[in-house]
Image: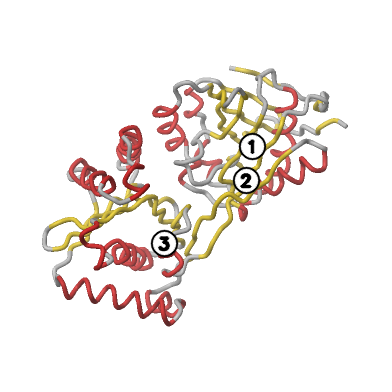
């Protein structure tokens, strides 16, 4: 059996790929445009973590039309040559081809055909964090099954999405009675402690100071969270903040009680979605739930500004669901090399830059 390949394929091995004309316009045609599909995110991640990896940005074309971008890297992992999406596993919450929903089937066919025919040495294509509602992971698995390409599939984690209603009262009405009561109680309790609680967002002038507050607060957390913010991770967060601030995407908030910061969030706003990427709070203030209260105010503010979705992103933390979020499965699809399959050669070509 041969693999169909309806799209012309090109491979760009240079970071200049992040300047491909039309990348952002193509991202806007996805089933759900998200910040991790932007060239800006991919470039920042590659600049920080690209050492020791081979960049392979695969583009798919229908005639002169750019149909899809699949930014990959190749790395040796325990003696196996593994292909993964730029963004890796731990820091990029959603991955997948950058393409319109109507093109996902052709992209899946052509991606498998490229994997079967490329002279790039690889043993495994390892696609983490494929959101089930976006559809590509399911299509890729179906195509592997149809063509007899060996694959593995696991649900590895969940994200949490909160569709936002038109107003705050409607939001509260959507919560269970218990969760609504707890939210109101925690907000009142914090205000009783300090009626002049301040929530502020970093701007260009305060970014350096506020970023240091966030990092120090994060490192002061207990358990694995406190160990997460290693120097290279802090540098990456700083790169992201510096890149996203002038674009208007960064949302770094600080909650202050009696003039001292007690909670912080590192987030993005892109399109119609608010992305809560990371958060921290002072352990000494735990009894007042400052992080929970801060996030609830961010939800209220987002509703007031007409934001459509509050994305809590990956992780099983209970507070997300107490604030009304819905679980979204994230799949890991693994494709193993199958040398016996070859693509249909007619009308198909590929170039490496």
Between residue 2 and residue 10, name the one nearer to us. Answer: 2
The quarter of the picture where the C terminus appears is: top right
| Mark 2 and mark 3: Cα distance apart in space | 22 Å
Asked if 189 appears above or below 353 in the picture, the reply is below
Q: Which residue is depicted at the point 28% across and 48% down? A: 218
Report the coloring of the rendering: secondary structure
Residue 316: percent from the left, percent from the top?
A: 48, 58
| Mark 1 and mark 3: Cα distance apart in space | 29 Å
For label 2, the residue is 100
Q: Earlier in the sequence, mark 2 or mark 1?
A: 1
For label 1, the residue is 67
Residue 297: percent from the left, percent from the top?
A: 30, 66
The quarter of the picture where the N terminus appears is: top right
Q: Which residue is depicted at the point 14% across and 57% down? A: 260
Q: Which residue is depicted at the point 14% across and 70% down? A: 194
User: How many numbered badges does the structure rendering display?
Assistant: 3
| Mark 2 and mark 1: Cα distance apart in space | 8 Å
For label 3, the residue is 307
Asked if 119 appears above or below 276 in the picture, the reply is above
């Amino acid at each position: 059996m041969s693999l169909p390949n309806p799209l012309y394929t090109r491979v760009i091995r240079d970071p200049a790929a992040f300047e491909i004309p039309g990348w952002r316009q193509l991202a806007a045609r996805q089933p759900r445009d998200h910040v991790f599909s932007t060239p800006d995110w991919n470039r920042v991640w590659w600049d920080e973590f690209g050492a020791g990896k081979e960049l392979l940005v695969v583009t798919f074309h229908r005639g002169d039309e750019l149909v899809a971008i699949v930014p990959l890297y190749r790395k040796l992992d325990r003696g196996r040559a593994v292909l993964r999406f730029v963004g890796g596993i731990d820091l990029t919450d959603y991955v997948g081809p950058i393409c319109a929903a109507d093109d996902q089937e052709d992209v899946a066919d052509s991606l498998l055909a490229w994997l079967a025919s490329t002279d790039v040495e690889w043993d495994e294509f390892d696609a983490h964090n494929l959101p089930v509602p976006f559809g590509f992971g399911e299509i890729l698995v179906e195509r592997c099954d149809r063509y007899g390409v060996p694959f593995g599939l696991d649900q590895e984690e969940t994200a949490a999405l909160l569709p936002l209603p038109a107003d705050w009262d409607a939001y509260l009405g959507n919560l269970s009675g218990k969760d609504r009561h707890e939210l109101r109680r925690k907000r009142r309790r914090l205000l009783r402690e300090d009626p002049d609680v301040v929530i502020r967002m970093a701007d260009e002038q305060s970014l350096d100071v506020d970023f240091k507050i966030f990092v120090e607060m994060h490192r002061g957390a207990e358990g694995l969270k406190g160990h997460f913010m290693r120097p290279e991770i802090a540098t990456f967060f700083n790169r992201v903040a510096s890149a996203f601030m002038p674009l208007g995407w960064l949302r770094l908030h600080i909650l202050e009680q009696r003039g001292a910061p007690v909670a912080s969030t590192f987030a993005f706003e892109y399109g119609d979605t608010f992305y809560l990427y990371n958060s921290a709070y002072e352990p000494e203030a735990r009894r007042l739930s400052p992080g929970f209260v801060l996030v609830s105010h961010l939800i209220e503010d987002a509703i007031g500004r007409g934001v459509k979705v509050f994305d809590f992103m990956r992780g099983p933390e209970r507070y997300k669901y107490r604030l009304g979020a819905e679980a979204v499965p994230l799949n890991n699809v693994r494709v193993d090399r199958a040398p016996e399959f070859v693509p249909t050669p007619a009308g198909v070509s590929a170039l490496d830059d």
